[in-house]
Image (cartoon, rainbow, N blue to C red):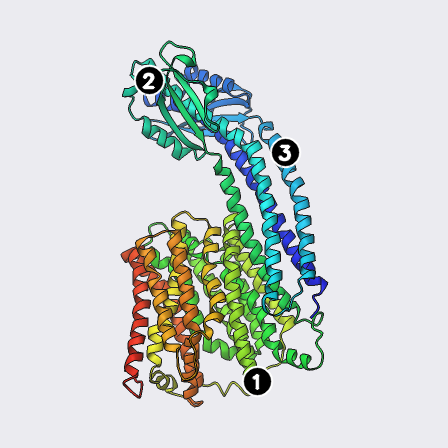
Amino acid sequence: MRFPLIPAFLFSLLIAACLAAGAWMTEGSLLKAYRGILESRFAIALDRTAEGAMHAASLGVSLDSQEGTLGAALRRERALDADILGMAVQDARGRRLYSEGVMPEPAPPGTLGQTLLDDIGLPAGRILLRYDPRALEVPSAAIRQDMRGYALPVVTGAALLGFLAALALRAGRAGRGRLRLPLALALILGGGLLLIDHQASRIIDRTLNPLIEAKVESIGNGARSLIDKALALGIPLDQLQGVPEYFESLRRHYPELERIELQVVPPDGIDEADAPEGRLLLPIPAQGAAVAALAVAVLEVVPDNRHAADQIHGLLLDTAFLGLVALLIGFELLSLLTQTSAFRRPSGAVAAHAGAALPAEQVRGVLFVFMMAEELNRPFLPSLTERLLPAGAAHAPLLVSLPIVVFMAIVALGQIPMALWSESLGRRRGLMLGAGMAGLGYGLCAFADSYSGLLLARAFSALGFTLVFTSAQGHIVDQADPAARTAGLAVFIRAILAAALCAPPIGGFLAEHFGTGTAFLAAAGLCLTALCLARAMMSATRPSGRAHAVRTAPGAFRDTWRIPGLRALLLGCAVPAKLILAALCFFLVPLILADEGYSLSSIGRVQMIYPLMMVLCVPLFARWGESPGRDARPRKIILGGLIAGLGVFPVVFLPGLGTIMVFLLLLGLGQALSITPQSSMMATYAHHGQGRHSAQVLGLFRLVERGGSAAGPALAGAALGLLGPAPTLALFGLLTTGGALLYGYGQWRSTFNPSGRLS
């Protein structure tokens, strides 16, 4: 197939959009960092002034009576910093007491303030500070000019390279050739982001670092003044008390301060010019001395210039992940475009083959877009629920799990009724209606300002989700050709895994930078997009005569439950696999990482590990260990369960981000190893049902799986409230490991029991 110009333009546009977004967000972070450092410099002046005022207030001296001393402090601070235009003091009612310099009344926007507290911690007044806006505006304009002037050619050049690469490395090649285009586009994107990061580092060195050094020097001067006062009172240098604790409090309060240390001056004195690069030496003269050569001690102050750079690196890392996800989405969109009449130009036998595979490929694009909507909330839903809980709510961890539990339970219980409803509506109409309902539910989630409101919105979203899921699955199952159904279900699973891989980092990024409401609105937009795609891509043909064929005979599920070996597979492997996935990956992991202070973007990136392992390893393990005359499926199921269960215990004994990532990797590895043989064995049980039980076997399998997904977060929430994080993690590890071992024991017994019955 010839690679058309429109997909090439699509990839170049994606690269340009990602790089432009990265440059724009980097510029915003630089401006925010500059403003924060500048205003924190003025905050030091407020802190110094407020300290003396509150000390006097604790001795019973009111603010009205401090005009002499406090007014002198205001004049001293203005003299120390030329960018301070004016300072003023207010009482607790907001009445202006006295001021220094230019301070209009009422105070203009942008005025900084510091609350004064009395000896019992109640507000006694407020100190205001107004700084010259040119101190912010002029450097900000220079940052914008430098960033935009550099980013424009980078974005343009990367877009052109992406366009040329897409034309040169044509799609549809077999073997290794299929990876050339994604790798080339990823390299172009990464190179552009590295160039933007390099320019940001240059701006930091030129603009932010001098400001950081000035701020740190001001902090050091404040500490030095306290030591000077102590020496003036006759306290020897080696008898000063509380100095290390005071220095540590400064380090905690000011992230730009890497180290502050008091050192005794050597006999040959000090020379400030000889200070190592990146360090400031502030001499403390002996009592009565006025020159640094007679100093008795020196205060070494080291600024941390990495703080702003680390923020920029983290932001660009987010952009890199989003760019890679955008490329994955681009390839999915390309697959969708090739199913439209504008790009589908096969002929002869190829046309017949394309027409046969068309229904599954069409529903793949619709399902991929729709499933991304639910996956967007994975990084932030538990922490959002925790914030919406009423203060002091009993059983808080269990309540936090309920939005996930309710959603999963409705999906589990609604499979059969929604499948029948979608069949009576027609698959396309059912999918469109479900997408509209889910989109409305996500929109309600965006505006939910209470726990109960979020819970109801999630329940409504679950109804739409279930209708979409069953309609899409039914659209594939309705095909007459068994080979088409098998291939279609494989496409169905790939679309779900691709959405689970792409959506979490996007959802985490949107929630962190624009709010959770924006992320839910994006999910609603995806639902509407899926609705439009279903309207344009799916056939409106309604299946006939199937409603009666799927009715369940009385006692059918009871008979199905008694099939030898089925219970062991369901309870020993299928249920624990869903329990550990929903409880840990969807609930506990984002909750633990959020409590430890990790950003939502980081949580989203971490949640990519599991679906990535599934995407990479399921095809790899599908035929691994298989040989004629040897059934390796039970061994692979047992080994996969053991890997997934035992992978929890590193997190139990060494909690942290690294071990959580290892657990998710092992969980993906274990479930990738077991999912294919597990599905294959369920198909074998269905086949042995000789028609009467086949539908019930598969229905029971899905019902039990979905039930495990619903029960997992509830069990984790209850255990978290009773036992704490580590025992809860261990509990799910033991459940999964024990289930695999029990299934293995049942398989061992079946070798000595011809019936294979495990009752």
The image quarter containing residue 24 is top right
The image quarter containing residue 183 is bottom right
User: In screen coordinates, is 598 left or right of 340?
Assistant: left
Q: What residue type is labelled 1?
A: Asp
The residue carrying mark 2 is: 230
Residue beneath the point at 63% across and 54% down: 15
Residue 62 appears in view: no
Residue 199, horizontal then vertical, whole percent: 60, 40
Vertical comparison of 171 with 555: above or below: above
For the residue pair 385 and 264, the one nearer the viewer reads as 264
Residue 649, horizontal then vertical, whole percent: 32, 59
Q: Earlier in the sequence, mark 2 or mark 3?
A: 3
Q: From mark 2 to mark 1, how far is it between C-alphas?
A: 91 Å
Q: Earlier in the sequence, mark 2 or mark 1?
A: 2
Vertical comparison of 710 with 359: above or below: above
Q: Earlier in the sequence, mark 3 or mark 1?
A: 3
Neighbours of disc 1 within 10 Å: few (<14), some (14-19), many (20+): few
The residue carrying mark 3 is: 142
